[in-house]
Amino acid sequence: MRTVRWGLAATGLAFLQMPAIAGPRQTVHFVQAPKILVWQNGILLGEGDESQLIGAPEMIAGGGALLPVRSLTPGGVQTLTLQIASNCGFVLEAANPAEAQQVQVAVLGQGANASVRRAATPIRSTVVFEQTEKTAVRPGPVQSQAISIALTWSGVGPRALWLRTVPS
């Protein structure tokens, strides 16, 4: 009787292991294209792998157009505040190194599910700001995965500013 029970138990275990042994296993990986989303005052300005923020010949693809930058002080200091979420690293670039040096970037904050991973910008580069990885650190609403930055400059300022994805 005891031998029969052990035999049945061994047969049952063999049946339980059979699906794992029986055949090949296939895994499907979904890949998202690199994407940046940009907001100003809660209005979506653009999304995609590139957005031209200043100097755009036509309206940016998205929910709105960039609000005009106004001088806040008599000295001509201008500020542009943006919220940016991305699923990859990105750079904010000016047209040339001289214009990039005019723009100062301040990180104002980050959403509850976001993190700033800023890289040092090289001297004499067109890069104004670089985020090395995606902004999200946890799942959640997209705007909670955004970082907030303020761009300031004196005088005329940059002729063009672009946000571009950076391959990981």
Image (spheres, rainbow, N blue to C red):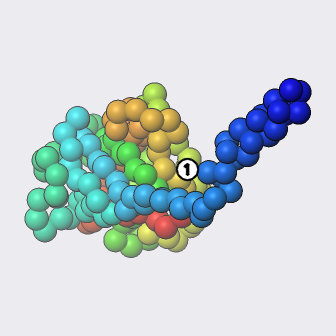
The residue type indicated by label 1 comes to Arg
Q: Is residue 69 left or right of residue 131?
A: left
Q: Can you tell which quarter of the image residue 110 is in?
A: top left
Q: Residues within 10 Å of mark 1 (few under 14, many from 20)?
A: some
Q: Measured along the vertical axis of the image, is residue 134 above or below residue 81?
A: below
Q: Can you tell which quarter of the image residue 21 is in?
A: bottom right
Q: Is residue 93 left or right of residue 38?
A: right
Q: Quadrant location of the C terminus? A: bottom right
Residue found 88% across the figure and 33% down from its top: 3
Q: Measured along the vertical axis of the image, is residue 134 above or below residue 26?
A: above
Give residue 152's position: percent from left, percent from top: 36, 47
Residue found 48% across the figure and 50% down from its top: 134
Quick check: can you spot residue 130? Answer: no
Nearer the observer, 89 or 54: 89
Give residue 113's position: percent from left, percent from top: 47, 32
Question: How many numbered badges does the structure rendering display?
Answer: 1
Nearer the observer, 136 or 5: 5
Residue found 53% across the figure and 59% down from its top: 27
Residue at the far front: name it: 1
Residue found 39% across the figure and 39% down from its top: 146
Give residue 141's position: percent from left, percent from top: 35, 33
Give residue 127's position: percent from left, percent from top: 46, 64
Q: Is residue 88 left or right of residue 84?
A: right
Nearer the observer, 15 or 29: 15
What residue is pinned by disc 1? 118
